[in-house]
Image (spheres, rainbow, N blue to C red):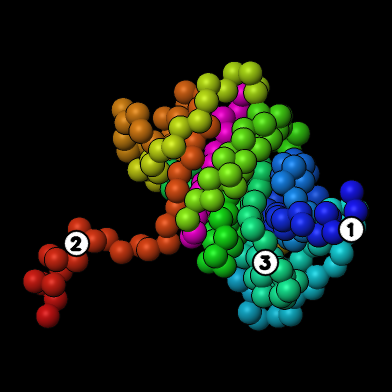
Amino acid sequence: MNKVEKMKKPLIFVTNDDGVGARGLRYAEQVALKFGRVVVIAPERPQSGMAHAITMSRPLYLRKVKEAEDLTVYACDGTPVDCVKMGFDYLFADEKPVLTISGINHGSNSAISVIYSGTMGAAIEASFYGAPSIGLSLVDPDPQADFGGAALYGERIVADVMRAGVKSPLCLNVNFPAVPADRIRGVRVCRQNRGYWKEEFFCRQDPRGRDYFWLTGNFFNEEPEATDTDEWALANDYVSVVPIQVDLTNYEQVGELKKVIR
């Protein structure tokens, strides 16, 4: 392949929230490399649960971790959204990526978890820049989880999106069930399940007698019988695909509130 042919390869941006050393990120790189040249900007350290947080109170640092044919990897000591902003507003000044992949996350980002997710925070931020973005998450938080099915179906979904040229802004929240690839039953385009997390704090004392707290919790599904949601799809060994929008307006209440608030 000559230099001109290499230059024709599209630019794919990859990021995550588990950090530049995460195993899931390596699988995301492999998926992205099937479609073009890849630039990775990932957090220096794990940033799960950072949602759409940005760093404003200190400077950010960016270092190159790896450079190989069609793949360049950077680490940024900020949040996932910081990584996206650093890419689009600094590194990609001359050429914008045609697609952003965020993940593959270690753990589910279905249902209400989407609003807490650093993976999806990065994907949503990237969609603001006019190209499709896809957040990929595996419903298994184990650092050594089997990413085979996620990589296989992630590649298929990316290929479908790029081939179809879906109108931007497009942001997809894709979750993969924690089963081997041959047990995945297919893909379901569906809606976000209604539910909530009920948190619990465990209080302990440090050696100096000061209280400290560990957060834990359980997810409560408010519509367990619904069959058109991401939670149902995952529970039944399907890949869930939910299109995400940023507009948080509750349109059903606008008319009523206009009568109440004058």
Callout 3 secondary element:
loop
Q: Residue beneath label 1, please? A: 3
- State the separation of the CA atoms marked 1 and 2: 57 Å
Visible in this render: residue 19? no
Visible in this render: residue 129? yes
**Is 218 inside the magenta-drawn segment?**
no
Q: Amino acid at mark 3?
A: Lys
Q: Is residue 147 left or right of residue 168?
A: right
Callout 1 secondary element:
helix
Q: Dots 1 and 2: beta carbons under 8 Å?
A: no
Q: Which segment did they paint magenta?
A: 168-179
Callout 2 secondary element:
helix
Q: Amino acid at mark 1?
A: Lys
Label 1 Cα neighbours within 10 Å, binned few <14 / some 14-19 / many ≥20: few
Q: Residue beneath label 2, please? A: 253
Residue 238, percent from left and from top: 51, 27
Examine the rendered structure and indicate whether residue 36 appears above or below residue 224: below
**Is 169 inside the magenta-drawn segment?**
yes
